[in-house]
Image (tube, rainbow, N blue to C red):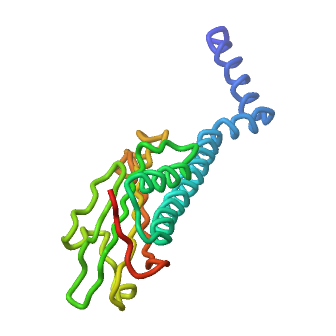
Amino acid sequence: MVARLWPWTGLTRTARRFAAERGGVSAVEFALILPLMLLIYAGCGELTSALVLDRKVSRAASTISDLVAQQTSVSSSSMANIFDAATAIFEPYRTSTAKLVVVVVNVTSSGQTVVWSQARNDTAAPANTAPPSGLTVPGAIATTTGQVVVGRVTYAYSSPFANVMKSITGSDTYNLSHVFYLKPRQGTTIAFTS
């Protein structure tokens, strides 16, 4: 009987020694925490990237509104230059997913109508109609009659971790959008010449 227990006795001693050993505890703890640390690091990087891009969207919307509001008339070629200037703000991000719209809205006591509109990678609002949803002038700005320049930029942001984000939020693309409203600075109207 002693001969049969001998292998178990050695195994029992080895298990006790292994359980008492504390030399590899730090390595095991690090191996357990490393995936969580990498997830937090990647998440912070993605959040920072999204916040930087959101700021660029805001700046681009402000830029197109401001550049149009400074003019008394805008041509197709000058509008293309304004859109080029706004999309340059997105560097080093892709500019092909940026949607830019400028709408000049006439505000009167009877309502709001689109005077003219131009767009890049998006649909321009038709003239002599009510402004589309999201481009109407808020009541706080539309207190006086006259024209208002409305600039909207929308950017479809897709994370490099799109599959992970889709499993958490249900979407792999997030639309960052900003709208700016400005009154004409030189006069009361801004004409569009093709």
Is 188 on the left or on the right of 48, as rendered?
left
Residue depicted at 42% across the width and 75% down the height: 181
Give residue 30's position: percent from left, percent from top. 70, 39
- Dividing the image into 4 quarters, which one contains the N terminus? top right
Query: Image quadrant of residue 107?
Result: bottom left
Work out whether 27 lies above or below 145.
Answer: above
Residue depicted at 50% across the width and 65% down the height: 67
Give residue 120's position: percent from left, percent from top. 36, 51
Give residue 52's position: percent from left, percent from top. 58, 55
Query: Image quadrant of residue 131?
Result: bottom left
Name the residue furthest top. Answer: 3
Is 52 on the left or on the right of 118, as rendered?
right
Q: Nearer the viewer, residue 60 or 162?
A: 60
Give residue 189's position: percent from left, percent from top. 37, 77
Q: Nearer the viewer, residue 102 or 175?
A: 102
- Dividing the image into 4 quarters, which one contains the C terminus? bottom left
Number of numbered discs overlaid on the protein picture: 0
Work out whether 42 lies above or below 139.
Answer: above
Is 124 on the left or on the right of 70, as rendered?
left
Name the residue furthest right. Answer: 23
Work out whether 163 lies above or below 137.
Answer: above
Residue depicted at 36% across the width and 59% down the height: 101
